[in-house]
Image: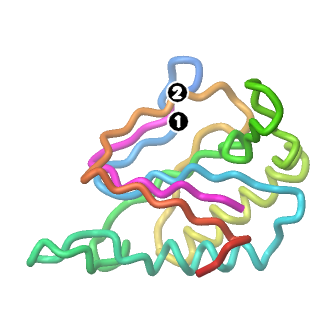
Amino acid sequence: MRVVVQRVSEASVTVAGEVCGEIGAGLLLLVGVEEVDGQQDIDWLVRKISQLRIFNDAAGVMNLSLQEKGAEVLAVSQFTLFASTRKGNRPSYSRAARGDISRPIFDQFVASLSQAIGCAVPTGIFGADMQVALVNDGPVTILLDSREPE
C-alpha cells in the first residue's frame, strides 16, 4: 500500500457536486492498494500514520502526533499512486489492485485508522470521479509505502 500524507489546514472531497467528506486542520491521506496488500500492510500504515510526529508543538517543531494535536483525517482512495510510465507516456495502472480487491482493503484501513485515533475518518466515494480540495499546511507532504518500511 502507498499513502501520500498531506498536512492540511482544510480538505474536502466532492462527488457530483456534493461534499462527501471534509476536515479542518489535520491530514489528507491519498491511499493506493496493490493486489498483494493485506492486513500486515494496513497495520504498519495505521501505526505509522497514527504515531507520525507531523504537527508543530509550542516551539514550532514537528513533534506532535494526530492524537496529541487533536487533528482530523480525511482518506481518499487513489489507484493512480501505482502509475507506471516506463513504456511511453501513457500511465499504466497494472500494479493497482482491481476494485473488488482494493475496496475491502481500503475500507479495513479506514476502520483500523478510525479505531487507532479514536474518531471517524471521512472518505470520498470509492471508485467515483472525485474532486479533492486542500490547503496544504507547510507544505508538508510525506510518502509512505508499506513495501518499503523504514
Please tell me whether residue 124 is drawn above or below residue 142 in the rendered image: above
- Residue that carries the numbered disc 2 in the rendered image: 131
In the image, 85 versus 131, the foreground residue is 85
Which of pointers 1 and 2 lies earlier in the amino acid sequence?
1
Name the residue at 58% across, 25% down.
Answer: 15
- Most extreme residue toward the top is 17
Check the picture and name the quadrant holding the N terminus. Answer: bottom right
Kindly identify which numbered label has been placed on residue 143.
none
Residue 110 appears at what percent x and percent y? 63, 61
Please tell me whether residue 75 is drawn above or below residue 149 in the rendered image: above
Is disc 2 placed on a helix, strand or loop? Answer: strand
Kindly identify which numbered label has been placed on residue 20.
1
Is disc 1 placed on a helix, strand or loop? Answer: strand
In the image, is 105 to the left or to the right of 75? right
Marks 1 & 2, CB-CB < 8 Å contact: no
**Callout 1 environment at 10 Å: few (<14), some (14 to 19), or many (20+)?**
some
Name the residue at 43% across, 38% down.
Answer: 12
Residue 142 appears at what percent x and percent y? 46, 60
Count of marks overlaid on the render:
2
Residue 137 appears at what percent x and percent y? 27, 51
In the image, is 104 to the left or to the right of 66? right
Name the residue at 52% across, 54% down.
Answer: 29
Kind of residue sitting beneath label 1: Cys
The answer for how far apart the CA atoms under marks 1 and 2 are is 10 Å
In the image, is 6 to the left or to the right of 29? left
In the image, 87 versus 15, the foreground residue is 87
Q: Is residue 90 magenta?
A: no
Q: Which residues are magenta?
A: 1-13
Please tell me whether residue 96 is drawn above or below residue 117 in the rendered image: above
Location of residue 47 by image quarter = bottom right
Please tell me whether residue 17 is drawn above or below residue 84 in the rendered image: above
Check the picture and name the quadrant holding the C terminus. Answer: bottom right
